[in-house]
Amino acid sequence: MRRADFQYELPPELIAQAPLPERSASRLLTLEGSTGAIADRRFTDLPGLLRPQDLLVFNDTRVVAARLFGTKPSGGRVEVFLERVVDATRAWVQMRASKPIRPGLVIRTEGGELLVVERVQAPGGDLWEVETPGDALAFFETHGSVPLPPYITRSAGTMDRERYQSIFAREPGAVAAPTASLHFDAALVARLDAMGVARAQVTLHVGAGTFQPLRVEEISQHVMHAERYAVSQPLVDAVQACRASGGRVVAVGTTVARALESAAADGVLAAGHGDTCLFITPGYAFRVVDALITNFHLPESTLLMLVSAFAGREHVMAAYLHAVRERYRFFSYGDAMWITPASGARA
C-alpha cells in the first residue's frame, strides 16, 4: 500500500488547540469494523458499549517535560527535545539549530550545561546523546516544558501540566501523551468499576517518532521508530481471566495496542519488556486486542495505518470523512473513537 492511501483533507480549525473543560465531555464516534456502521455519541456513553466481563487496558506512562531551549557558545539558539533517558546523567535527544551540531559542543541552558557526546543511530530516528548536569530525568522535569505536539500552535501553559497527562500516569518516560486515556475522569472510571469492567495497565513510553511523517511512498519501506514497553505478569493474568469469562480486551489507545501485540509476537501474550519497532499495517492479524478506543490521527501517519489494519482502511477513511463533516475535534486534545475489528482482523 502507498502513503497516499491514508490521506484525507482536514480543515485546520478542526485541530483541537486546548482540552475541553471536562475530560469526559468529548464526543465519541463509534465504528463497527465488520460492517462499517458508524454512530455519533458522547464519551460518557462508553459504559453502554462495554460489558461487565470486558478488560480495559491503559498505558500508565507519564509525560516528561521534554522540551528545553539553550544557546551555543556562539550565541546560536538550540531546541533540545528529549527522546529517552539512557542512564543517570545521559539522554538521547533530538536537536534543532541553525547550524550543524557536532560532538563536544556545550549547550548552555537555564539548568546548566549540556555536553553533546555523540550521534546515535537509533531505529527510525537520528538522535544525539547528551550528558546532563545531574540526574537526567530530574533535569528535564525541572527545567523543561510540556512537549505539546507540533500541530498545537500555542505555547504550553500551566494547565497543560495536568491535562496533557492521563489520570493513570505513573511511570515517567514519555514525550507525548497516550491521548485516548485523556478522556477518562474519576467519575467515569467509578461508573465502569460499578459495572464490573476490569482495568489493567501496560507501559509504553511514547517517543517523539510518533509525530514523524512517512518519507517513503510504499509503506512497507518505512522504518518504525523504537519505543520502550513493559507488560507485567498481572496484566497477562488479567487478559487470561478476561478470555475465560468471555470478555473483550479493550486497548485504550494505539500505544496499548502496540505494547500488547509486541508482547504477543510469538503467538501468545507473555510478560516482558524491551524496545518495539512493530509497524502495524493492513493485513496484520491482531492476537490480543478485541476493541480499540482511540483519538483521531494525522493523515498518512503510522497510527492511522494501525487503526486501518484493525477496522479496515475503507471503513476508517469513511469514518474520518464523516468526522470532518460533523465537525469533530481532531488529534491529541480532540474527540475519540470506539472501534471494533473488521472481519479477518483478529488472528
Image (tube, helix red, strand yellow):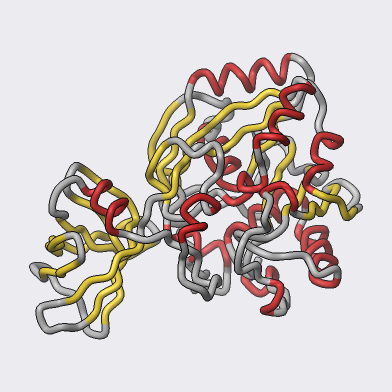
Could you tell me if residue 283 is visible in this image? no
192 displayed left or right of 222: right
Residue 204 placement (x, y as % from top left) = 47, 41
Name the quadrant of the N terminus: bottom right
In the rendered picture of this protein, how many numbered marks are placed on residues? 0
Up-down relation of residue 54 to residue 182 (above or below): above
Could you tell me if residue 126 is visible in this image? yes
60 displayed left or right of 288: left
Residue sitting at x 51%, y 24%? 270
Name the quadrant of the C terminus: top right
> Which is more toward the observer, 127 or 263?
127
Residue sitting at x 11%, y 84%? 74
Q: Quadrant of residue 275?
A: top left
204 displayed left or right of 218: left
Residue sitting at x 46%, y 59%? 158
Q: Quadrant of residue 69?
A: bottom left
Residue 203 placement (x, y as % from top left) = 47, 36
